[in-house]
Image (tube, rainbow, N blue to C red):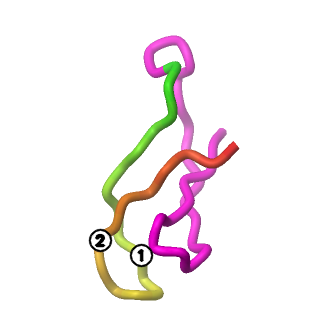
Amino acid sequence: MIKLRSTAGTGYTYVTRKNRRTTPDRLTLNKYDPIIRKHVEFREDR
């Protein structure tokens, strides 16, 4: 289980799963941030 935190600085997070064997580096995804109502980049937060 990992947290994806918004790079927009709103503090919004998504919680998801990740296979560490196939993706050992940090995950970045474009997802919707409802606080600013836009799609922004979310990065893995440990």
Q: What residue type is labelled 1?
A: Asp
Magenta-colored stretch includes residue 19: yes
In the rendered image of this protein, does residue 13 appear above or below residue 36? above
Residue at 31 percent across and 57 percent down: it is 30
Residue range in magenta is 1-23
Tell me residue 26's x, y (percent): 51, 34
Task: Say which element carries label 1.
Answer: strand
> Of the residues shown, which amino acid type is indicated by label 2?
His
Q: Mark 2 points at which residue?
A: 39
At horizontal 47% and vertical 87% (from top left) the residue drawn is: 35
Q: How far apart are the two marked residues, 1 and 2, measured between alpha carbons?
A: 6 Å
- Quadrant of the snapshot with the N terminus: top right
Which dot marks residue 33? 1
Q: Do the residues labelled 1 and 2 touch (CB within 8 Å)?
A: yes
Query: Of label 1 and label 2, which has the lower sequence position?
Result: 1
Magenta stretch secondary structure, dominant: loop
In the figure, 40 relative to 19: above or below?
below
- Which residue ends up furthest to the top in the rendered image? 21
Question: How far from the left and from the top, in percent, is residue 14?
Answer: 54, 60
Residue at horizontal 70 percent and vertical 43 percent from the top: 46
Residue 13: quarter of image: bottom right
